[in-house]
Image (spheres, helix red, strand yellow):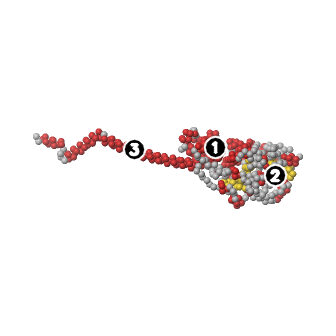
Amino acid sequence: MFQETIQKGYTHKGESITLGAAMLNGQADATCLVKLPLKTFNRHGLIAGATGTGKTKTLQLIAEELSKKSVPVLVMDIKGDLSGIAIEGTVNDKITERYNSLGLTWQAAGCPVEFLTLNNGKGTRLKATVSEFGPILLSKILGLNDTQGGFVSLLFKYCDDNQLPLLDLKDLTKVIQFISNEGKDSIEKEYGKISTTSTGTILRKVIELQQQGGDTIFGEPSFDVLDLMRINEQGMGYVSVLRVNELQDKPKLFSTFMLCLLAELYSKLPEEGDLDQPKLCLFIDEAHLIFNEASKELLDQIETVIKLIRSKGVGIFFITQNPTDVPAAVLSQLGLKVQHALRAFTAADRKSIKQSAENFPESEFYKIDEMLTQLGMGEALITGLNEKGIPTPLAATLLCSPSSRMNILTDEEIDNICTKSAIARKYNQDLDSHSAYEILNQKLHEATQASAATEAAEEAEKTTSRSKNEKSTLEEILSSPVTKQVARTAANVITRSLLGALGIGGTSSRKKKSSWF
């Protein structure tokens, strides 16, 4: 009965991926291989389990199998332990024993890998411009209310109307400062009243994002998401390993990048419907970092993208410790569930396990809540979708081992891969194009120079005017009758004084002449 159920549920007509063999009573049955159809991998998935139960190796296994089927993969390597997927692994006794139980043959193989980075680390740098985010997404990332979000839309409209490219956060900050001060009056005439309270709040939010390292992901050259979907000459899909281990303490920045990437994929890729295989699969390790710090608006946006991006041929897989880390609305969209062991150390843990067990289809072969605590390393409960989209029966599975190295690469090995990158040269350059920051600074400089020139001209005009006024006043004084009378009187006084000094004053002569008679 068990064999019949598993074989029927996991036998498919098209291309499929083998994850392992189903177990009953702790023993793997090599005749009951757990295979999942390739065409359902755009229906998203979840890999969950406690620390040390094998989640990362399961992620590595699925990424390898997809790459072998010519499906490109993007992996968020937060812990820094997925770089080994680039190099073929080495067989050991544990692998030999496991594959004997599975009835399969293990073959060492690596995958074509492209290392990516969000900062100046090793690998191809990823960046996007502020304009590519758009006002709605940027408002959600900054956690703005409707009023503030409306102002951000106005800001983008103003920049579009005035040819002010928004490339990085430096541009955005400069535009906000300009609108709040020098340009406020002119902008309000055309776009309406602007609240200084809103501009101040938005500016603080932008600075907060900068402090979390936002400057590293905003700017040029902008990364083309189509470069994630490459196939090598041997027909294997590239595995792009984004090394984001420095973002563990920067959840807002991580959420920002992820939502931007998903939005860019959704906007650029055409509608595909049901494909025989996905165009890209994206694995987000430590997914709780996205959801724990996300606002309600951001969660709504993620949920919307998850629902719609499937039709673009993109599958998204979340890797986390507990299924409850993922919001119920998102969890309901995940077709594949790979559940590793959970640990019940507290009453809260036991309650969480019971809740997790309810997320799986009922099984007559397993007591799910008990099974979740009894799984060993490299074992998991699996349920997926068949080719018709119907959930497959629950199977406790002994998983296959990855074909690549199950350990990290050395710095020298990473350097060697990075130097052979076909796209690193395209993106690993620093560009600072003439954008809003430079344009507004130039305008302010010109305005300052013009103002200084105007002030100098006005001062010169005032000086000339004063000189003319003084001359005019003197002329008026000199030509007035009073002035002329004063001048005549003064002249007479001076003349009499001179004559008196010579002894020939008129009055004294007359006096003397009179006395002679």
Q: Quadrant of residue 134?
A: top right
Residue 370 or residue 502, whichever sits in front: 502
Question: Label 1's element?
Answer: helix
At x 47%, y 47%, the residue is 453
Q: Residue furthest left?
A: 517
> Where does the image place residue 72, in percent across and percent down from the top left?
74, 52
Asked if residue 52 can be seen in this view, the reply is no
Question: Label 3's element?
Answer: helix
Residue position for label 3: 465
Q: Quadrant of the C terminus?
A: top left
Indicate the amino acid at tag 2. Answer: Thr
Indicate the amino acid at tag 3. Answer: Ser
N-terminal of the two: label 1 or label 3? 1
Distance between mark 2 and mark 1 Cα atoms? 44 Å
> Where does the image place residue 437, in percent across and percent down from the top left?
57, 49
Residue position for label 1: 135
Distance between mark 1 and mark 3 Cα atoms? 54 Å
Q: Is 481 on the left or on the right of 55, as rendered? A: left
Asked if residue 268 can be seen in this view, the reply is yes
Indicate the amino acid at tag 1. Answer: Pro
Characterize the local packing of mark 3: few (<14), some (14-19) or many (20 or more) Cα atoms within 10 angstroms: few
At x 25%, y 41%, the residue is 489
> Where does the image place residue 169, in percent across and percent down from the top left?
61, 48
Distance between mark 3 and mark 2 Cα atoms? 95 Å
N-terminal of the two: label 3 or label 2? 2
Characterize the local packing of mark 2: few (<14), some (14-19) or many (20 or more) Cα atoms within 10 angstroms: some
Q: Residue furthest right?
A: 1
Q: Is 106 on the left or on the right of 201, as rendered? A: right
Name the mark on residue 18.
2
Residue 86 or residue 93, whichever sits in front: 86
